Amino acid sequence: MTDTNRRFLLSKRPEGKPEPDAFELVETDVPEPGPGEVLVRTLYLSVDPYMRGRMRDRESYAEPWAVGDPLRGGVVGEVEASNHGDFEPGDVVVGNLEWADYAAVDGDDLRSVDPDLAPISTALGVLGMPGRTAYFGMLEVAHPRPGDTVVVSGAAGAVGSVAGQIARMGDCRVVGIAGSDEKTSFLTDELGFDGAINYAATDDYRAALDEAAPDGVDVYFDNVGGEITDAVFSRLNVDARVAVCGQIALYNEKSVPTGPRKLGTLIETRARVRGFLVSDFAARFDRATERLGRWVRSGDLRYRETVTEGLENAPEAFIGLFEGENVGKQLVKVGDRSG
């Protein structure tokens, strides 16, 4: 084990899309775990769109970072040393840790990862927070019914790709919206979506929806907001359900634009719109992960990961989320398991 620990700090609050100078890589000593703490060496680091909100100087559903604070996110790591009875060196764990090579963390904030269940990286993706977000958002918020037309925006991402497959397993017709021909082919050819729209290849989202979903939209799983969501709202059927999971199209806006007013659509369609956080369902995380794991092992649920090598490249991977570079879950590989 090296004596040096690299950590990323928030060096400034970004204006618009984050730039590399918002991230500062510093070197410190490897921390010593205190009573009840565990020293974790990072193997995989997750970068997620919600982190952009934590860079702002205002409250949202996630507490903002102060300038100079370490950046934090989902981490799968290996226990190097432990002062906690539930963990010992060599164990694989997952938790919300710093963007760093090493972190000392309260053992109560960690969960064990079974490396025999699936690749350990999946604990940050299809079997982690994104997978559970898709699971609860689709089944508990959107409530798809057999025969429904389900539209998923951001459909080639970590959450959207799982959400669409869950709806497909429920005998729904699923249309995904993504930003390239590569991604739309991934949705239809690999994941079994019934249709897909490349929003980057059309200026008329409504016409594209009319072609892909000629019978209208019964369920909309919204990951992006903006003009795409405006277009979907115009095609909602009576008694449609909308699950608002993310608004990535707006995360880098300096002020939220006022677009066409769509609430009148809800009067006509009697549609229900509900925002949610995956933490709302924390008491049932284990059950969701178990079921997702069964689907992965059976081949009913497929996933893809985009992996960037090296902690030093974590900012690049994060910025790439807002440029549509990832397919599936975006991860940063920091290290390998010992042995």
Image: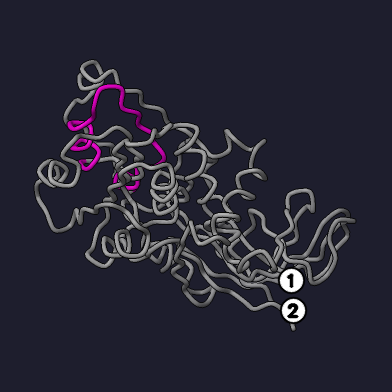
Q: Earlier in the sequence, mark 1 or mark 2?
A: 2
Label 1 crowd bin: few (<14), some (14–19), many (20+), radius 10 Å: some
In depth, the one of 261 and 199 nearer the eye is 199
Type of the residue with mark 2: Asp
Q: Amino acid at mark 1?
A: Val
Vertical relation: 330 (above or below) 308: above
State yes or no: discs 1 and 2 in contact (Cβ < 8 Å): yes
Residue at numbered disc 2: 3
Instruction: Tell me the residue at 50%/32% (across/down).
Output: 140
Q: Residue furthest top?
A: 267
Horizontal and vertical percent position of residue 235: 19, 33
What quarter of the picture does the C terminus occupy? bottom right
State the residue in front, 166 or 304: 166
Residue 118 in the figure: left or right of residue 158: right
Indicate the position of residue 53 as horizontal and vertical percent values. 44, 45
**In the picture shown, does residue 239 fall above or below 336?**
above
Q: Is residue 163 left or right of residue 106?
A: left
Dot 1 falls on a residue whose secondary structure is loop
In percent of width and height, residue 312 lies at 51, 74
Spatial CA distance of label 1 from label 2 is: 6 Å
- Looking at the rendering, the stretch of residues picked out in magenta corresponds to 227-251
Residue 59 visible, this angle? no
Q: Is residue 62 left or right of residue 34?
A: left
Q: Residue placed at 64% from the left, 63% from the top?
A: 76
From what the image shows, is residue 214 above or below residue 165? above
Q: Is residue 331 left or right of residue 217?
A: right
The residue shown at (62%, 72%) is: 6
Residue named by callout 1? 30
Q: Choose between 261 and 128: the one closer to the eye.
A: 128
Quadrant assignment, res 326? bottom left
**Residue placed most toward the observer, 244 or 100:** 244
Task: Answer whether residue 301 is visible to the viewer in this image.
Answer: yes
